[in-house]
Image (cartoon, grey):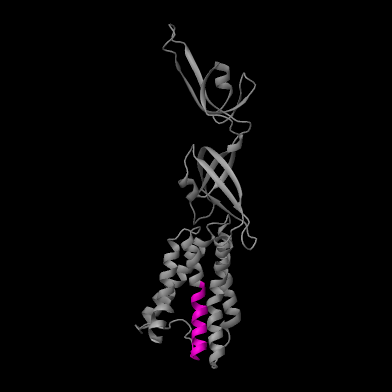
Amino acid sequence: MNKLLYRVFFSAITRMALGIALLFTDPLSVTFRYLIVIIFLLPVIRYIVHEWQQTGMDIFFNGYPSLGIISHVFITTGIAALYVLVVAHVLQVYSTSYFWWILIVIVPVICWYLLFGKDAPPTERREHNRRALLRTLAFYIIPFFFAVNYAFDFFTPVYTKYYITRSDHHTYTSYDPDISETAVYYFYLLPAGSITGTSRWQTVSQNDYYGVERYGRYNGRDSLHYLVMDKWKGRDSVSAHFREQFQLLLLRTDTVPSRQTVSHRLYEQFQDGDYLHKEEHRGLFGFKWVSYH
């Protein structure tokens, strides 16, 4: 029974499978919440079981058949790559730069080397098990901390609703020889509370038509403020002289949209004319994060 437990429950293969499952799980789902706890608790439970049975923990490759050095290299490389992907998956909820992602990957490596990299492995079983646990937690603790910060954040968020008047993106030439171009994505957001009616077409004069821009502000003859959603000009087929006609698609509002930079994932998720619900969360440990739906 113990051998089966070590082979299946505590093996590195199991942890890889759980890590891959985590990559395909929505970070804001209930499944993610408990999956991240299970992954974190596995090495802790393994340590407790070994200490209870007074057995020694292998550093890494405990519990599966010996298939030679190739399998060890494959598993070590696979877990290293998986760790980087999991860190990126956990941090995607935060509005942060890639610098912090890289830092969170590097810091555990530095801590591991400073604490355990120089010293010879201890011969005493208890110390050996303790160091094996700390080696694992050195890599697990930071992603777990930031995941729990939002996965178990049940505080009431600050809620804001926006109307996406339009979306846009620009591609900039990069001076980095390894990166040819950089794409930046934008939403033009109008606070939903500022909209006091539905959009409607209105016939205007030629001067008014050319005097405003699409998505610009228009002051109507009724002394109300509008946002120009679209413009149209053409021939009036009803008139005997087919006079040119000018129309504006107006949305009544007292403000103008603000341009905000968004991620490519969010840019692909919404379209012009959609409502964007933004929730700013406090975070269980005080690290703020934002969700959109």
Is residue 135 at least partly visible in the picture?
yes
The structure residue drawn at horizontal position 56% and vertical position 69%, both measured from the top left corner, is 106
Question: Residue lying farthest bottom?
Answer: 123
- In-front residue for pair 104/23: 23
Is residue 2 shown left or right of residue 253?
A: left
Q: Is residue 183 above or below residue 237?
A: below
Give the percent coordinates (x, y) of residue 233. Answer: 47, 20
Give the percent coordinates (x, y) of residue 264. Answer: 49, 49
The structure residue drawn at horizontal position 52% and vertical position 79%, both measured from the top left corner, is 44
Give the percent coordinates (x, y) of residue 56. Answer: 49, 89
- In-front residue for pair 113/132: 132
Q: Report the magenta stretch's main SS.
A: helix
Q: What stretch of residues is rendered in magenta? A: 40-56
Is residue 120 at least partly visible in the picture?
no
- In-front residue for pair 165/176: 165
Question: Residue lying farthest top?
Answer: 240
Is residue 46 part of the magenta span, yes or no?
Answer: yes
Give the percent coordinates (x, y) of residue 97. Answer: 57, 57
Q: Is residue 217 above or below residue 204?
A: below
Q: How many marks?
A: 0
Is residue 286 part of the magenta span, yes or no?
Answer: no
